[in-house]
Image (tube, coloured by chain):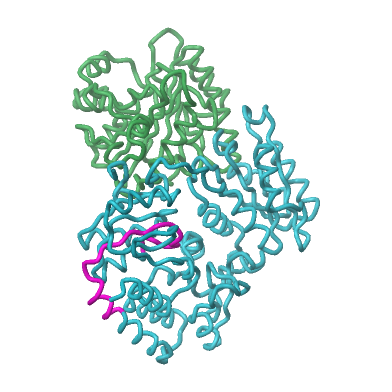
Chain colours: A green, B cyan
Amino acid sequence: MKKIAVYGKGGIGKSTTVSNISAAMASMGLTVLQVGCDPKADSSRNLTGGQNIPTVLEVLRKKGDPELEDLVVKSTTGVLCVESGGPIPGVGCAGRGIITAFEKLEELDAFGVYKPDVVMYDVLGDVVCGGFAMPIRGGYAEDVCIVTSGEMMSLYAAANISHAVRSFGKRGYASLRGLILNAKNFEGEQELVDRAAAEIDTPVLYRMPRNQLVQQAEADGKTVVEAFPDSEMAQHYRTLAKLLLEGGGDV
Amino acid sequence: MFDHLKRLSAVKSGSGIKFLSPAVFPGNHCPMRIASVIVEDIRGLSSLLVGTPECATHSRLFSPLPEGRNGELHWLYVIDSNEVVFGCREGVADALRKMDRAGAEAILIIGTCIPELIGEDMEGLIHEIQPELKAQVTFVMLGQFKNVSYPPGSWKTMEAMASLMDRCETDSRRINVLGRSPFEEHIPEPAVTGYLESKELKLRYLAPGASLDDFRQAPDAALNVVLSPFAQPLAVRMEREFGVPFIALHDKYAPSDIDRAYGDIARAAGYEPDGRFDEEKRQAENIQAKAEERLKGMSFVFSQRIDMPVPLAAYLTEIGMVPLLLHIEEYYSADSAHTRKIKDAGYDPPVCRITNIAEDEKLIKELNPDICMGYFLKTDMKYVPDMYDFYGQTGYGRTVNILKRILEVTGE
């Protein structure tokens, strides 16, 4: 089983990238489980026709003790989707929520029941606390990728995340695989990202071009891979998916 | 009245078991208490309890001394307000270094609610600090908010001992007996252990009362024989990590299941069964036949103090009884196989935690059970009390005695 955690600054296109990678992997015949680890719970919207799915914490809050079927939604692309969700805004602890969601999936033997070939964790902007570090701890993921653009705040977040992953690396956990450039298409962007990657001492794994099809597909609540499977952009996502499957470590 | 309860088949862990009623109940013991008591009884094992001042104070009520009987260290690490925010890894690491210098041989970190709540990464901490230390370190996280009742304090602590085990060559004559101490004189010795000794097999008991060295060397065994639900998770982990197979006896009530398990033990240990248990088996089969005849269709309810309610309910269902309601203190992952048996027989009883029997008895009466088992105050229902007498026992004798008691109470 391959387990990959994708981090990156909020709004940078993580969920779009992860959903497309998941859809691309599913189209190769793989069983893919995508776990959204963000209280916003919008990781899988492009896989579920633009609809939000019930989150683990929402179901836990309402039902107390959910069944696995309450938490895992199979999308039209075949990707199995889970959203950890978060507590009611302003109350409780989001990090604790992530821990609880992970523990609940483990308790219900989600990996044993669905036997995914790949698990993709889509994690919010930064490793802000013990909860948001869960995907890179305890064998949940082995590879970590950071989605970034060339914008300063995005690269700043990437540096922070890489620092956190490296500090966890000493403990035998997931290792940083590299950056995924989700281009904003401004002048000098590529060079900025190259420089940042050199400073972080990690490769730029893939350079995803900017393409209007992404927004068009999103408007229909779909991934590019599903909406425009023959497009050049869909091919980019499939290439990135293959790259992620081929390298890194197996768990 | 019972709508708020889950059915047995829907329960996957202890958190799925609801209280039968909102009757007044001060709550269960913290599982940290059990862990602290167990660690004191393992010779050579030191401990570091990490928690709030109240955790530290509370633990000293039943584990009062910082030094154990054989020079072990039982130290406390009290978390301060900063550590609640930033984590306590540096302080805990320093404490471990001090314990190491003070001569601790092996240390069990007992994490309580706060470290669990803030996601303190004990596994990572140990990974980092272990190369600096002579003492081996393992940990158990026992946030009470995640462990509704006390049994996790036992089974999680036992399971954590696997981290201290050394990989070693298999000794084909060595058998580990898990979940039983040879010093438990108040509980009759299961017949199987004496029998295995008579076959000149070398038994090593892994339970409170054993030594750190016993645990360390345990992977050399050809077989683990499990006598308690508290020890089965350790057996599962030893099989996964060290390849030591296990055979559980504690959850076998049917004579045919016991017979099969004894046969499996003989094959694994390399001796020919010699009919030593034939008479006991015959007695168990006889009384089972009688029970099948007399108890068929009779409904039952389990109250507190039945140490393995799901396996026992599965057996009673197998002989024709009808489960109406089960009190379950802890749902073990191994219970799922017994749950399936009950479901396959056409039943799926609600499960609960009974916490105030005086009030809850009124609810149980509404079910109009033919017989109840477990702890009750004075009641006019037919019930088999003192089911905890069977704690720690296994084999045909236990089945015979349980069925005898049920038949006596039903008076038929």
User: Going by the image, does B310 lie left or right of A52?
Assistant: right
| Position of residue B50 measured from the top left corner of the image (x, y, whole percent) | 66, 42
| Position of residue B244 measured from the top left corner of the image (x, y, whole percent) | 49, 68
User: Going by the image, does A163 lie left or right of B294?
Assistant: right
Identify the residue at horizontal 56%, vertical 48% (top origin): B29
A85 or B400: nearer the viewer? B400
Q: What segment carries the magenta color?
A: B288-311
Query: Residue B316: in sight, yes or no?
Result: yes
A98 or A90: nearer the viewer? A90
B120 or B391: nearer the viewer? B391
Asked if the magenta segment contains residue B299, the reply would be yes
Quarter holding residue B128: top right
| Position of residue B168 measured from the top left corner of the image (x, y, whole percent) | 59, 69
Q: Against B337, is B111 above or below?
A: above
Q: Against B20, is A182 above or below?
A: above
B189 or A135: nearer the viewer? B189
Identify the residue at horizontal 31%, vertical 68% (top origin): B315
Identify the residue at horizontal 44%, vertical 53% (top origin): B329
Extreme residue in the bottom direction: B274
Identify the residue at horizontal 71%, vertical 48% (top origin): B60
